[in-house]
């Protein structure tokens, strides 16, 4: 990890950022829940991964990344050990990850969000940019989930309902 710091103005605070992210996570959870069991693990469009695999990617980023940031350890990215077999198992992992995110997010001092961190030993950016990447990546994959649900003739949750 480097200790470079960038100048940052204050637009939103740490707690507002976490609330925003958790709102997206609540919506993504509803997308997971909207899938029929079989299709969650098997259905895809155009060669993309099934939505369960996209959710596993998200589970492999948020909590593990924040734990690494809080501990200032550049740990590698891995999806190892995350292998739910049912929708209920996936939702339970999602809920557990929400608690993990809250725990480690709370351990990062607000002043540190402008400091750089080498995420997964590969991405050297200020911590706030890493967190924004987590949100952006989730929105991207949730959009894929919306396409899958529509292809299955299932109405997805409204994108603006994050509570």
Image: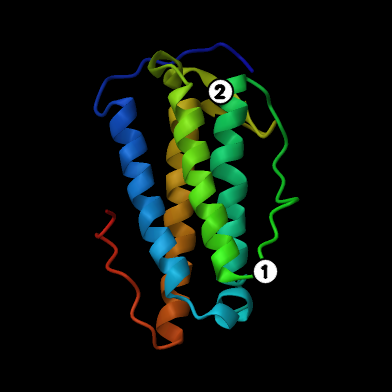
| Residue at image mark 2 | 70
Question: Which quarter of the picture shows residue 70?
Answer: top right
Q: Nearer the viewer, residue 3 or 93?
A: 93
Identity of the residue drawn at 49% across and 61% down? 141
Relative to 25, is 33 above or below? below
Q: Name the side, left or right, on which 10 lies relative to 101.
A: left
Q: Position of residue 109 (x, y in %)?
A: 43, 16
Screen quadrant of the N terminus: top right
Q: Is residue 13 visible?
A: yes
Q: Name the side, left or right, on which 130 lies relative to 122.
A: left
The label number, if any, that marks residue 85 in the structure image: 1
Task: Choose the circle earlier in sequence order: 2 or 1.
Answer: 2
Q: Position of residue 82 (x, y in %)?
A: 69, 54
Give the Cα separation between the discs numbered 2 and 1.
Answer: 30 Å
Q: Residues within 10 Å of mark 2 (few under 14, many from 20)?
A: some
Relative to 41, is 139 above or below? above
Q: Position of residue 29 (x, y in %)?
A: 43, 60
């Amino acid at each position: 990890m480097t200790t470079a710091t960038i100048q940052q103005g204050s637009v939103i605070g740490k707690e507002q950022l976490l609330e925003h992210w958790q709102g997206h996570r609540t919506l993504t959870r509803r997308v997971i829940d909207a899938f029929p069991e079989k299709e969650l693990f098997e259905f895809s469009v155009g060669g993309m991964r099934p939505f369960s695999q996209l959710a596993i990617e998200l589970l492999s980023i948020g909590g593990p990344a924040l734990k690494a940031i809080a501990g200032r350890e550049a740990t590698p990215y891995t999806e190892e050990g995350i292998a739910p077999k049912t929708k209920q198992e996936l939702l339970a992992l999602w809920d557990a990850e929400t608690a993990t995110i809250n725990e480690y997010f709370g351990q990062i001092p607000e002043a540190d969000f402008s400091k750089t961190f080498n995420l997964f030993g590969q991405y050297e950016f200020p911590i706030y940019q890493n967190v924004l990447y987590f949100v952006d990546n989730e929105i991207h994959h949730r959009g894929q989930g919306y396409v899958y649900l529509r292809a299955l003739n299932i109405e997805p949750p409204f994108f603006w309902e994050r509570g």
